[in-house]
Image (cartoon, helix red, strand yellow):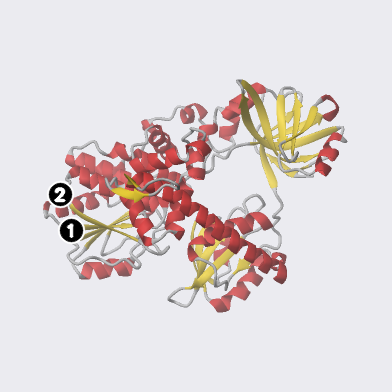
């Protein structure tokens, strides 16, 4: 038995695509499906952007030394690359240095400013580094912040361009998007047309930073950027992942197969790896030595070598995560930590600070409840780490619950994925407080379904209408679950598939229902049922020229279901 909730009008007969989009807050489906530049907002609505242009222009005129600080995530690398390459397009002689973080800290923290620097540009971070702004100001160094994160207000000692300051209607634009808007302003100032060249990196940054795809401007930039990928390193990563991506470059494939490679280097790569990756992003034409297994050493372009290294580092990261997750699972079982409303992990010496988010996500998924994973203490003596909510249940905003405990020094990020900091003496109290605050929350899976369709009515047309929207799936435009009611087992073809005979296939009315990694007991339960009802997602299988529409089953029931009204 599984729980479900019908989220819309259930119009699977006449308006499949419109229903899906309305269920995600898109009222004008035609505009969304044919999106164009008309949805774009003027950069002039960004507070302080003209001040930032004037400041940069002054430093270019003065032949100043400029430092770009690269924030440690995909959005930080892409936004840093955009402003670096844009400035070199203006004038290759502009004196620019750049700095990457060796650790997973953000903004100006831990950055050594080279002697003689006149201007520091911080893309995708730095809005609230007020003490650092003042410190640089005292040394006669100007600061331009091009950010999108929570902003506590204006700075007396830096120029902050951030939509959170008010006036700009799109709060779902990542750092790469804000840098792009700055480049648009620079285009107008210098009579250039360079900004659009970087829309591919704007798309990558926004996808990786989980910006909402319901925001029309953001959606437009992502769609336009993925149509023409210009960046050499981005292209090299796509080539490397082409098999997994099945030749498709869309929000889903970039989110699953490109962003994680870049993030793995940032989290567990060496400082040299991080430096080489940014060099690859900005297009440094460098040849490096590479010795393939069983072959002679050769010279290859850095971008291709770095794409190969990314996959190796991602594999290393997976091994690290698997090992520490196994240790954490043992800890949870031994100490009954899963009896709490939040799985709270701290004090493990083997835990790399760069992996807390990914590990936290796995723990939350396994135990179907929010999780907090902390690494070692920081300079202030506080534990820092990551939190992840469990969105498949009732709780849609774990961050606010965390803040409401009053026991955390910091909680910043998305509603169900964020970083936090807590004093050691507050941890036990926080666990108790979570148990109180979440006592009435249900963490059982509830499937939000777009359609409830009788098995006799499910057909190729419905499946194709859904699959034609596949390039749209992204943050807040989730791929739909559908429920198919009353598949008559006596009139269907039921078979076991695969080498291990652990895949069940049910063919009915030309639709194939696929159950993966199932036991023989489940197979016997299905063939012994009169009818079954399934919930899953639509897929297409093409084999030897034959097309079969499928439903990849997530859950099923041969009994009555509970409808969450």
Viewer-nearest residue: 471 or 232: 232
Q: How many marks?
A: 2
The kind of secondary structure element at disc 2 is: loop
Identified at 21% across, 54% down, the residue is: 96
Provide residue 491's location: percent of width, then percent of height: 83, 24
Q: Where's the C terminus, which quadrant? A: top right
Provide residue 267's location: percent of width, then percent of height: 45, 59
In the rendered image, is residue 185 in sight?
A: yes
Q: Reading the chain from its start, which is encountered first: label 2 or label 1?
A: 1
Tell me if 286 is positioned left or right of 414 in this view. Answer: left
The kind of secondary structure element at disc 1 is: strand
The quarter of the displayed image where residue 542 is located: top right
The quarter of the displayed image where residue 520 is located: top right
With respect to residue 198, does 488 lie above or below?
above
Query: Mark number for residue 524?
Result: none
Tell me if 400 is positioned left or right of 491 in this view. Answer: left
Mark 1 lies on residue? 65
- Packing grade of label 1 (10 A; few <14, some 14-19, many >=20) is some
Query: Nearer the observer, disc 2 or disc 1?
Result: 2
Identified at 15% across, 51% down, the residue is: 60
The quarter of the displayed image where residue 130 is located: bottom left
Mark 2 lies on residue? 93
Decide: marks 2, 1 in contact (CB < 8 A)?
no
Viewer-nearest residue: 497 or 51: 497
With respect to residue 430, does 215 lie above or below?
above
In the rendered image, is residue 415 in sight?
A: no
Provide residue 291's location: percent of width, then percent of height: 39, 49
With respect to residue 510, does 41 lie above or below?
below
Q: Where's the N terminus, which quadrant? A: top right
Q: CA distance from mark 2 to mark 1?
A: 11 Å
Provide residue 289's location: percent of width, then percent of height: 33, 50
């Amino acid at each position: 038995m599984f729980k479900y909730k019908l989220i819309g009008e259930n119009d699977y007969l006449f308006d499949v695509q419109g229903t899906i989009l309305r269920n995600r807050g898109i009222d004008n489906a035609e505009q969304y499906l044919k999106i164009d530049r008309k949805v774009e907002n003027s950069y002039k609505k960004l507070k302080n952007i003209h001040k930032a242009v004037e400041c940069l222009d002054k430093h270019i005129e003065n032949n100043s030394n400029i430092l770009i600080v690269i924030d440690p995530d995909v959005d930080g690398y892409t936004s840093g690359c955009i402003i670096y390459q844009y400035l070199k397009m203006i004038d290759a002689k502009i004196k620019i240095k750049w700095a990457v973080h060796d650790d997973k800290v953000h903004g100006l923290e831990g950055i050594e400013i080279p002697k003689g620097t006149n201007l520091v540009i911080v893309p995708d971070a730095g809005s609230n580094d007020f003490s650092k702004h003042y410190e640089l100001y005292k040394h006669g160094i100007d600061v331009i912040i091009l950010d999108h994160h929570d902003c506590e207000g204006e700075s007396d000692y830096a120029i902050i361009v951030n939509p959170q300051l008010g006036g700009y209607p799109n709060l779902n634009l990542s750092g790469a998007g804000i840098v792009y808007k700055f480049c648009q302003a620079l285009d107008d100032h210098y009579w250039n047309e360079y900004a659009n060249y970087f829309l591919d990196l704007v798309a990558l940054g926004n996808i990786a930073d989980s910006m909402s795809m319901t925001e029309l401007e953001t959606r437009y930039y992502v769609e336009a950027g993925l149509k023409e990928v210009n960046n050499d390193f981005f292209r090299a990563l796509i080539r490397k992942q082409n098999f997994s991506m099945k030749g498709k470059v869309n929000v889903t494939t970039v989110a699953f197969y490109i962003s994680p490679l870049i993030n793995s280097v940032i989290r567990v790569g060496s400082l040299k790896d991080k430096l080489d990756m940014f060099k690859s992003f900005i297009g440094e034409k460098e040849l490096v030595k590479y010795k393939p297994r069983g072959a002679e050493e050769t010279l290859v372009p850095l971008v291709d070598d770095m794409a190969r290294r990314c996959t190796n580092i991602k594999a290393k990261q997976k091994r690290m995560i698997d090992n520490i997750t196994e240790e954490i699972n043992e800890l949870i079982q031994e100490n009954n930590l899963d009896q709490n409303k939040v799985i709270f992990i701290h004090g493990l010496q083997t835990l790399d600070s760069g992996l807390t988010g990914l590990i936290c996500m796995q723990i939350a998924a396994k135990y179907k409840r929010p999780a907090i994973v902390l690494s070692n203490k920081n300079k202030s003596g506080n534990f820092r780490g990551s939190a992840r909510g469990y969105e498949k249940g009732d709780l849609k905003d774990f961050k606010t619950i965390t803040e409401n405990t009053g026991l955390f020094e910091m909680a910043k990020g998305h509603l169900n994925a964020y970083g936090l900091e807590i004093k050691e003496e507050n941890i036990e109290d926080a666990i108790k407080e979570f148990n109180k605050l979440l006592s009435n929350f249900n963490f059982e899976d509830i499937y939000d379904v777009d359609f409830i369709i009788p098995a006799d009515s499910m057909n190729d047309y419905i499946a194709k209408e859904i699959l034609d929207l596949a390039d749209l799936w992204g943050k807040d435009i989730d791929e739909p679950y559908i429920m198919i009611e009353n598949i008559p087992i006596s009139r269907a073809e039921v078979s076991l598939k695969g080498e291990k005979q652990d895949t069940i296939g049910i063919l009915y009315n030309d639709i194939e229902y696929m159950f993966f990694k199932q036991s023989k007991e489940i197979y016997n339960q299905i063939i012994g049922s009169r009818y079954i009802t399934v919930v899953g997602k639509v897929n297409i299988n093409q084999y030897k020229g034959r097309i079969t529409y499928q439903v990849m089953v997530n859950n099923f029931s041969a009994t009555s279901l509970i409808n969450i009204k």
